[in-house]
Image: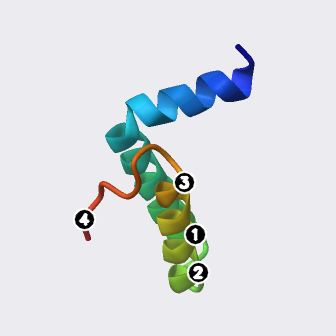
Amino acid sequence: MSFLDKAKEFADKHDKQVDQALEKIGDEVDKRTGHKYSDHIDKGVDEAQKRTGDGDTQQR
């Protein structure tokens, strides 16, 4: 099993934790950019969450 296969399997099994981590990363990036790109960062986080596991488990 390749590294990418293992990463995909992990993301599928731990969707909630992956979504939470993506949310925290997005919040930190938003903070460090002075909230100038909030809409773009939110869209990126949402898209990344859709592509992991069963989709976005975080509710805003």
Q: Residues within 10 Å of mark 1 (few under 14, many from 20)?
A: some
Assign a secondary structure to mark 4. Answer: loop
Do the numbered discs 4 and 1 sit on residues whose CB atoms are within 8 Å? no
Mark 4 and mark 2 lie on one chain; the one further toward the N terminus is 2
Give me the C-alpha separation between circle 4 and circle 2. Answer: 18 Å
Residue 39, percent from left and from top: 51, 84
Left or right of 60? Residue 30 is: right
Give me the C-alpha separation between circle 3 and circle 1. Answer: 11 Å
Which dot marks residue 44?
1
The amino acid at mark 4 is: Gln
Mark 3 and mark 1 lie on one chain; the one further toward the N terminus is 1
Which dot marks residue 51?
3
Mark 3 and mark 2 lie on one chain; the one further toward the N terminus is 2
Mark 3 and mark 4 lie on one chain; the one further toward the N terminus is 3
Assign a secondary structure to mark 1. Answer: helix
The residue labelled by disc 4 is 59
Residue 26, percent from left and from top: 50, 62
29 and 9: which is toward the camera = 9
Q: Residue furthest right?
A: 2
Q: For the residues carrying marks 3 and 4, which lies nearer the camera in this image? A: 3
The amino acid at mark 2 is: His
Mark 4 and mark 1 lie on one chain; the one further toward the N terminus is 1
The image shows residue 8, relative to residue 25, as above or below, that is: above
The residue labelled by disc 2 is 40
Give me the C-alpha separation between circle 3 and circle 4. Answer: 16 Å
Do the numbered discs 4 and 2 sit on residues whose CB atoms are within 8 Å? no
Give me the C-alpha separation between circle 4 and circle 1. Answer: 15 Å
